[in-house]
Amino acid sequence: DAGVTQSPTHLIKTRGQQVTLRCSPKSGHDTVSWYQQALGQGPQFIFQYYEEEERQRGNFPDRFSGHQFPNYSSELNVNALLLGDSALYLCASSSSGQLNTGELFFGEGSRLTVL
Amino acid sequence: KNQVEQSPQSLIILEGKNCTLQCNYTVSPFSNLRWYKQDTGRGPVSLTIMTFSENTKSNGRYTATLDADTKQSSLHITASQLSDSASYICVVSFRDNYGQNFVFGPGTRLSVLP
């Protein structure tokens, strides 16, 4: 049973470029959340997707957008990259059907470096 | 405002010693509290999950406690090993009309030295 998979694992971009990160949730999970983690900081919530719609959003500009596909996989897009966008981007999956003890599984992350 | 605070920010201990990490939260309404271990550059891995009615939960050498009245949790690591060197993140969740929401603490960076 595959866990949460993310791609690519590492990438380097220059300022102003655009990037797309991908995530496949754990089997049986239908909800995908994206987080940005700067070096030495805790993860910051970007947004959550459920039933192919953005359900919740954190305090991130519109340059950050996403998509969820019918198979529950998801993409995170960042436009007009800034140096401050350099971070580890984590994808987490969960099941909407689980109650209070529902698990939240993380992928290994995509390390984005903006030069 | 829903917040999770952790202390200390960083900690250095010798191999074989015990240590305790703290987590204070102001999340409401409380759903559950989780501790994650995150190795550098990797994704967080769950250690324990506790609901409102649970006071203690163990996972090998890791023991988490929860005091829902004071809104405090601790993670105790026994007989530390070099592989315990990582960041430990406290995550508190609450439910609203959209489902579960997760509030992350900043983490405690633990270094175990030989």
Image: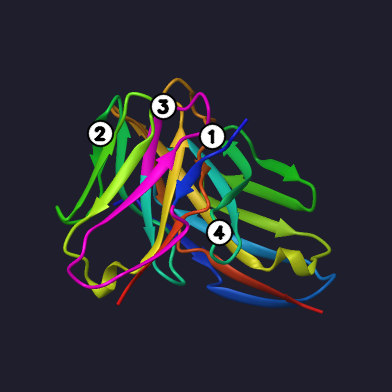
Residue type, numbered disc 1: Glu
Closer to the eye: label 3 or 2: 3
Tag 2: residue type? Arg
Where is residue B96 drawn, in percent x and y?
Answer: 31, 31
Q: Which mark is residue A103?
A: 1
Which percent across, then down, holds residue B110?
A: 64, 70
Q: Which residue is disc 3 drawn over? A: A30
Contact flag, marks 4 and 3 (Cβ < 8 Å): no
Please rate how many residues cluster around mark 1, counting C-alpha atoms within 10 Å: few if below 14, some from 14 to 19, many from 20. Answer: some
Q: Nearer the viewer, mark 2 or mark 4?
A: 4
Whichever of labels 3 and 1 marks the residue nearer the N terminus, that label is 3
Gap in angstroms between the C-alphas marked 3 and 2: 12 Å
- Find residue B18 and report its image quarter: bottom right
Residue lying at 51% horizontally and 45% vertically, measured from the top left: A106
Q: State left or right for residue B24 relative to residue B85.
A: left
Placement of the C terminus of chain B among the 4 image quadrants = bottom right
Is residue B56 located in the magenta-colored stretch of the structure? no
Q: Secondary structure at mark 1?
A: loop
Relative vertical location of residue A50 with respect to residue B18 in this rendering, above or below:
above
